[in-house]
């Protein structure tokens, strides 16, 4: 009744913001991404403990926090997910959960994708339901129901796509290409950490209040397919263009929702301008993308990663740079 799973976070090229259905966590568009080798979570779940469920998260600096059951928030979804796993598998015991992140917890690096993917896989494995774990499409549906579409993309290896679907059955993840397909590098330039004022969970429900949401959806028509093709063709310039436009459009929606969500900081904007100049003036293969936070994800090729890393490290607001390569998706590493 115990299992360990590891899973990577991922960086999306065409991003998920806003939902068609807030109960089933159905996104409004197909999204695609690359798994990140240096941003991972390892989660151990053991059923059969007494006194109630407990969930603890620790990071690579030794910071540790107990997760409370807050209904409606992402933390609370972990407890709801344990209930769902118990209900689907017939296990009735309480669970002890410990999760370890490979990166600092408070640094604003998307932690939920790695954490949620490892959590759901470990929970089903610990409950003895390996059919759900081994059926990656079904696993991705279960991860999505735990509240995170980005986490659902970490169900498969390498470059992946979460498909738009009008029902629970039709919204799931598929692989675009394995990790070895393309040696892209994602350099996460970590800026001063700041607590998010609007969580992604709340942000998704506010997206519809932006007058630009429909414009973003109209624009997105056909774009996930173009991004998928750019990945398959290893067409850096096309992926760069699609991805930068998508990030800016998403942040325009965030900033124009009511209340507005401003995730970017002045340093984020400054680095965006630098990245454009490194590409246009210095001829580097480089583009930026941002999740719901200020840290730029600067995408480049393995050949140019060292030069781009040095440029990023020179920026006075960059605390450190995390270097990610395409990675495998969720794995069960021990079981039984
Ligand atoms: C902006 O609810 O999936 O990263 O931010 O990690 O809590 P967390 O996850 P989620 O929404 C974030 C979506 C996004 C874009 C994306 O990854 O598609």
Image (cartoon, rainbow, N blue to C red):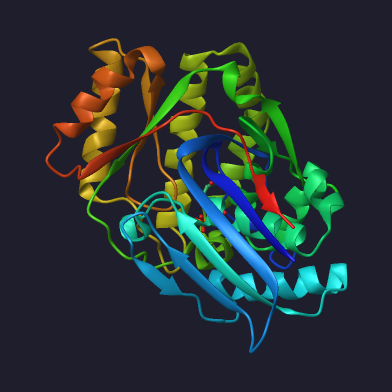
Determine whether, in the image, residue 282 is placed left or right of residue 161. left
Front residue of 115/273: it is 115
Residue 242 percent coordinates (x, y): 51, 27
Residue 326 is at least partly visible in this image: yes
| On screen, residue 131 above or below 44 | above
Name which residue lies at 52% across and 28% down: 326
Residue 83 percent coordinates (x, y): 74, 76
Q: Quadrant of the C terminus?
A: bottom right
Determine whether, in the image, residue 88 is placed left or right of residue 25. right
Which quarter of the picture shows residue 143? bottom right
Name which residue lies at 47% across and 42% down: 249
Determine whether, in the image, residue 291 is placed left or right of residue 296. right
Front residue of 282/222: it is 282
Residue 42 percent coordinates (x, y): 54, 53
Determine whether, in the image, residue 230 is placed left or right of residue 138. left
Front residue of 321/41: it is 41
Front residue of 211/292: it is 292
Which quarter of the picture shows residue 205? bottom right
Name which residue lies at 42% across and 67% down: 198
Name which residue lies at 63% across and 39% down: 329
């Amino acid at each position: 009744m115990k299992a360990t799973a590891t899973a990577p976070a991922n960086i999306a090229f065409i991003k998920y913001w806003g939902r068609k259905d807030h109960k089933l966590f159905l996104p409004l568009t197909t999204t695609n991404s690359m798994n990140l080798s240096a941003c991972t979570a390892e989660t151990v779940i053991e059923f059969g403990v007494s006194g109630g469920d407990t969930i603890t998260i620790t990071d690579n600096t030794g910071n540790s926090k107990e997760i409370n059951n807050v209904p409606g928030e992402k933390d609370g979804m972990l407890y709801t997910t344990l209930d769902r796993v118990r209900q689907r598998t017939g296990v009735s015991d309480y669970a002890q959960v410990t999760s370890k992140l490979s990166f600092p917890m408070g640094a604003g690096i998307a932690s939920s994708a790695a954490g949620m993917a490892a959590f759901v896989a470990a929970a089903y494995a610990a409950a003895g339901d390996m059919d759900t774990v081994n059926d990656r499409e079904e696993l991705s549906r279960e991860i999505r129901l735990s509240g995170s579409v980005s986490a659902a993309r970490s169900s498969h290896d390498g470059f992946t796509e979460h498909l738009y679907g009008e029902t629970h059955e039709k919204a799931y993840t598929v692989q675009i290409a394995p990790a070895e397909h393309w040696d892209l590098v994602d350099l996460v330039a970590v800026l001063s950490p700041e607590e998010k004022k609007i969580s992604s969970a709340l942000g998704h429900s506010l997206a519809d209040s932006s007058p630009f949401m429909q414009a973003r959806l109209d624009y997105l028509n056909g774009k996930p397919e173009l991004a998928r093709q750019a990945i398959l063709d290893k067409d850096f310039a096309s992926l760069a263009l699609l991805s930068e436009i998508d990030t800016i459009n998403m942040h325009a929606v965030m900033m124009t929702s009511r209340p507005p969500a401003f995730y970017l900081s002045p340093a984020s904007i400054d680095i965006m301008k630098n990245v454009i100049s490194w590409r246009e003036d210095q001829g580097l293969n480089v583009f930026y993308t941002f999740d719901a936070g200020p840290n730029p994800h600067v995408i480049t090729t393995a050949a140019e990663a060292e030069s781009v890393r040095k440029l990023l490290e020179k920026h006075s607001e960059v605390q450190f740079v995390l270097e990610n390569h395409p990675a495998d998706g969720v794995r069960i590493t021990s079981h039984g």
